[in-house]
Amino acid sequence: MRNSIKRVYNENINAPKINMSFLMLTYFIRPMKTLSWLNLFFDSISWLLFYVRFLKNSILVNSI
């Protein structure tokens, strides 16, 4: 009885790591299978533009 409880406890401890890696894998594999990779691509571009704008603003503020 005690061994089975311990085994379940260990599995529950190890589960989050496995789930996270699985989620990451599906996150990277799913865009390749579907057309959502275009969505991801444009999202990343918009994020980069926002980041560059933010950097420019901070540089301007620092130069003044």
Image: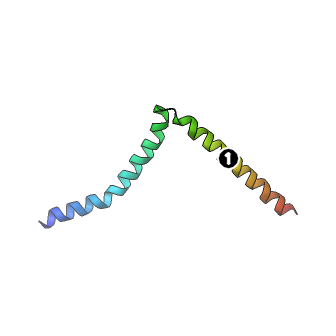
Residue found at x 32% / y 56%: 15
Q: As drawn, is 59 to the left or to the right of 35?
A: right
State the residue in front, 18 or 38. Answer: 38
Q: Amino acid at mark 1?
A: Leu
State the residue in front, 57 or 9. Answer: 57
Say which residue label 1 marks.
Answer: 48
The image position of residue 26, as x and y in percent, is 42, 42
Residue at the left extreme, as displayed = 1
Residue found at x 88% / y 63%: 64
SS for callout 1: helix
Residue at the bottom extreme, as displayed = 2
Residue found at x 75% / y 55%: 55
Residue at the right extreme, as displayed = 64
Image quadrant in which the N terminus is located: bottom left
Q: As drawn, is 1 to the left or to the right of 44?
A: left
Colour setting: rainbow
Query: Quick one: label 1, few (<14), some, or many (20+) residues within 10 Å?
Result: few
State the residue in front, 4 or 49. Answer: 49
The image position of residue 27, as x and y in percent, is 46, 43
Q: As drawn, is 62 to the left or to the right of 38?
A: right
Residue found at x 60% / y 38%: 41
Classify residue 54 by image quadrant.
bottom right
